Image: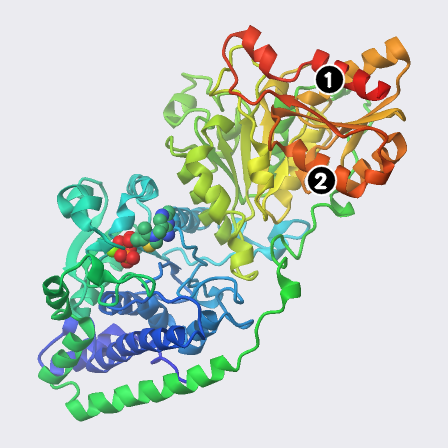
Amino acid sequence: MLTMPSRGHGKSGAVAEANKAGKTYEGLSRQQLIDLYRVMYTSRRLDDREIMLKRQQKIFFQISGAGHEAVTAAAGFAMKPGYDWFFPYYRDRALCLALGTTPDDMLLQAVGAADDPSSGGRQMPSHWGYKRLNVVTQSSCTGTQILHAVGCAEASRYFMMHPNAGQKASGDYRQFKDVQFHGDEVTYVSLGDGTTSEGEFWESMNAASNLRLPIVFLVEDNGYAISVPVEVQTAGGNISRLVSGFPNFHFEEIDGTDPVVSYGALSRAVAHCRAGVGPSFIHAHVIRPYSHSLSDDEKLYRPDIERERDAARDPISRMQLFLIRDGILDEKEINKLEKEVDDGLQAAVDRVLAALLPQPETIKQFLYSPDIDPTSSAFDTQVSTGGAARTSTDQAAQEKKIAPKTMADLINATLRDEMKRDERVVIFGEDVADCSREEYLRRKMVKGKGGVFKLTSGLQCDFGSDRVFNSPIAEASIAGRAVGMAVRGLKPVAEIQFFDYIWPAMMQLRNELPVMRWRSNGDFSAPCVIRVAIGGYLTGGAIYHSQCGESIFTHTPGMRVIFPSNALDAAGLLRTAIRCDDPVMFLEHKRLYRESYGRAAYPGPDYMIPFGKAKIVHPGTDLTVITYGAVVPRALQAVQKLDREAGLKIELIDLRSLNPYDWETIAASVQKTNRVIVAYEDTLSWGYGAEIAARIADELFENLDAPVKRVAAKDTFIAYQPVLESAILPQVQDLYLAMKELAEY
Ligand SMILES: Cc1ncc(C[n+]2csc(CCOP(=O)(O)OP(=O)(O)O)c2C)c(N)n1
Ligand SMILES: [Mg+2]
């Protein structure tokens, strides 16, 4: 098997050796220069091989690292695989080779083999991910990885400050989430020039700068983003000029086709980060000789003259000339090295074309944790309100403890107990801290805020500012940083202030968070909790403080979606969310936070409810109503009224958990009552209940005595004026009439 040179970039020996020849090559020895060339040449020839295979229809996609080899190989030589952390993008073939990936590994992904170590045949080629090297699984989205890098670097710092947090523990996700940290590890992230236009890039730069995070940003500027030239992407045509005002950075703008120059810049960048001074930003000018991908023909938008100018800077030929000119290798030795590489690649291609393909039965593997099942009985625990009181003061305390509390109180208490129990839990979001200017709290000048709904009140005071902190108003960064932290083993419980403002985070919540485990074939995961205040019935909430939209997330495989309707369920389900090993979207209805409906005493520090278990709120035999969230208390009123008025016995089911959901309870009830209404607060068409209704119609048709009915919001936005709001959202009267009508059908 073809292997890359071993990675002993010991500097002192290198300097001595290079000095012998009178040149230091930024600390690279002559042997290391040869090794570097071998990596670069292998990278280029692998691209050539893949292009051939694509033309023979043996692989299905090709995107090359051609023209980027010098700076990316140099980055690999300047950093430590399996020690530092890497968030590369698709042009980083030479980086991965330098870190220790083999050509076999890469070709296995190109053919989509079962043994593709990055994804088991699930991702396109050049979507790197190598667990043993700390190369984290990447997607195809331009820019999402930059926020992951921020979260990863934050985790490095966190574990340094809280070394015990990394210890293994049993009984929750920690049993399966090993933490590795060294204290001075550096996070590498790369991106193209076009990708600097993404908001996520700017959010990342802002966070890395402000927090002085040890991240090396490498912008590989090949002058184009597919067909769009850099001056259209970037004001003034130069990203270095734009970012130069960010504090705490080490900046360099370099010729990224020169490996020695690149190695020097990256070594300084890494040193700046390792010293804990702040992030680094290397802006490397490179070329793109092979069009954007094999699906693109750059001759359509780039004239020959421009392409020829680039070709003169080709890093492979430049490096060959350099090696000869400096007497490091002669022409014969270069030919020998190249032949070795070519022969090795031929053998690798032969092996890989015989590799086994993945089995179709495996398509659902690793959507969720194979280790922890949050629907299991392990998450079914009893309420404990403490032992019997012995004295009168005990009794007073006891009474206080068992006095009914609001959903807001119990969520706060659950967060507090989980933070106490598990030092990996960190909480962040907009306004979640008590007070970012800590001295105001220390000097008792202020009481503290703790969330716009006060759900996180007092947690910063109790657990410190590195465990509970405010984020900038940048929802993508809230979700993206959570992904990076969770990859490293932290348990972020991040908050999106209003569901209405979740949309900037959509790319992270759809394409990253729930996909990490599946696309890496189980090698990476990001189990974290995203708490979101959701819903209307606020009388005045209007369009932008009333939205639902849970079906958008239940429509996303890999994401657990939970929506409690009362205090006790909120406490039990939130604890399951925190302790389980999957990403969870935890939807908290704003209107229910302080409602008198569904208050409960705190059920104790270990109370959990398994996901996917509905609750029968009101038993009945005449009709089934399936709902969740704020429609539960409204439906209950209608159910009770119909019982009083007509003696109707209506079974009311609160789903509580939307993905997974409790089909067994639904089916058993419909088989008994033969009539069913699915009610939900979101707009009627394409809402969450539409899927439940469709499945009932499909699988329980024989049991139905009446059509499946839906009660939901009108298909419009939610208006400010309460008269309009009340006409738009489903009300008790709407539910009452629908139940009455269906019972009489
Ligand atoms: C969010 C997102 N938008 C669009 C695309 C489609 N796309 C893939 S690569 C690319 C251009 C990226 O250009 P640049 O960042 O300069 O990187 P380069 O390919 O030039 O190395 C685009 C638009 C994508 N993958 N993700
Ligand atoms: Mg580009």
Q: Nearer the viewer, residue 443 or 478?
A: 478
Q: Position of residue 218 (x, y in %)?
A: 27, 56
Give the residue at mark 2: 661
Q: Quadrant of the C terminus?
A: top right
Q: Is residue 106 left or right of residue 560?
A: left
Q: Is residue 686 left or right of residue 435?
A: right
- First in sequence: mark 2 vs mark 1: 2
- Residue drawn at x 60%, y 11% is 726
Asked which quadrant contains residue 530, the reply is: top right
Q: Position of residue 744 (x, y in %)?
A: 85, 18
Q: Position of residue 226 (x, y in %)?
A: 27, 55
Give the residue at mark 1: 735
| Mark 1 Cβ and ligand 1 under 8 Å apart | no
Q: Please say if 658 is above or below 264.
A: above
Q: Is residue 632 left or right of residue 263?
A: right
Mark 2 against mark 1, which lies toward the viewer?
Answer: 1
Q: Please say if 535 is above or below 111.
A: above
Cβ atoms at labels 2 and 1 below 8 Å apart:
no
